[in-house]
């Protein structure tokens, strides 16, 4: 099967899975509805409101909001601000690795991945990545974190335990928004360039 057909097959499979999940949710009577609304101003170090990815830690009951110049951490139940992880040029995604008490934050403007302590929210290290470091995902099977670097068409692979760069994987097209596919691996998407 050529790459084009494989991409179409993967897109159709994802659409069918999404439709099946939606139908099962509707059949179970579980509809989404608004519970609470929280307002946030500009993040520290920024003059404008900016939001990118939202990452939820269901066990710790925390929500990590990508705010551009910092990551804001809020209590999932009350909406209270628990703190900020500051110091970014253009922050995008957050990956959480509770088994190593680490979080990983992409900074597309600085081409790096910052590593922070999940309990203190203090930065404990960083790994060099490539330009336009954007989305990031943790793969528990390999114990690695994968960043999707748009402008350079690649992914930086970081060992979650050591924080060291393992390798860089070149992609055809623009890597973006990977999702976990189960016990091992993930699927990435190819956005259309305009």
Image (tube, rainbow, N blue to C red):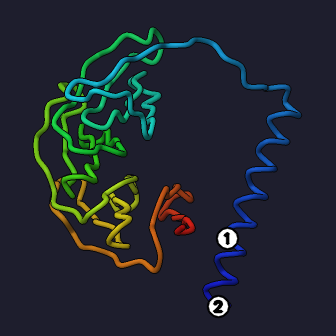
Residue appearing at x 84%, y 30% in the figure: 28
Judge whether 52 appears above or below 191 on screen. above
Question: Could you say which quadrant of the image residue 140 lies in?
Answer: bottom left
Give the residue pinned by disc 2. 2
Tally of numbered discs:
2
Judge whether 173 appears above or below 132 on screen. below
Label 1 Cα crowd, 10 Å radius (few <14 / some 14-19 / many 20+): some
Give the residue pinned by disc 1. 10
Question: Could you say which quadrant of the image residue 154 lies in?
Answer: bottom left
Q: Is mark 2 on a helix, strand or loop?
A: loop
Q: In this view, does 106 lie to the left or right of 18?
A: left
Q: Where is residue 113 in the image (x, y as percent from the top left)?
A: 22, 52
Residue appearing at x 18%, y 53% in the figure: 110
Q: In this view, does 17 lie to the left or right of 102?
A: right
Quarter containing the N terminus: bottom right
Q: Position of residue 167 (x, y in %)?
A: 24, 73
Label 2 Cα crowd, 10 Å radius (few <14 / some 14-19 / many 20+): few
Residue sitting farthest toward the bottom: 2
Residue appearing at x 22%, y 62% in the figure: 129
User: Looking at the image, is mark 1 or mark 2 earlier in the sequence?
Assistant: 2
Q: Do the residues labelled 1 and 2 touch (CB within 8 Å)?
A: no
């Amino acid at each position: 099967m050529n790459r084009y057909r494989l991409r179409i097959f993967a897109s159709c499979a994802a659409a069918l899975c999404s439709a099946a999940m939606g139908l099962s949710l509707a059949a179970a009577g579980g509809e989404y509805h608004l519970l609470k609304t929280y307002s946030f101003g500009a993040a520290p170090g920024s003059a404008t409101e900016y939001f990118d990815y939202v990452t939820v830690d269901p066990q710790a009951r925390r929500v990590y909001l990508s705010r551009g110049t910092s990551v804001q951490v809020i209590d999932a139940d009350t909406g209270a601000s628990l703190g900020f992880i500051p110091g970014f040029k253009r922050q995008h995604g957050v990956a959480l690795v509770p088994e190593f008490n680490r979080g990983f934050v992409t900074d597309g403007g600085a081409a790096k991945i910052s590593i922070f302590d999940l309990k203190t929210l203090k930065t404990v290290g960083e790994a060099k990545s490539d330009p336009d470091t954007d989305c990031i995902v943790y793969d528990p099977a390999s114990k690695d974190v994968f960043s999707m670097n748009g402008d350079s068409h690649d992914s930086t692979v970081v060992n979650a335990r050591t924080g060291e760069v393992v390798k860089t994987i070149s992609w055809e097209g623009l890597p973006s928004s990977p999702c976990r596919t189960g016990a091992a691996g993930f699927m990435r998407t190819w956005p259309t360039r305009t």
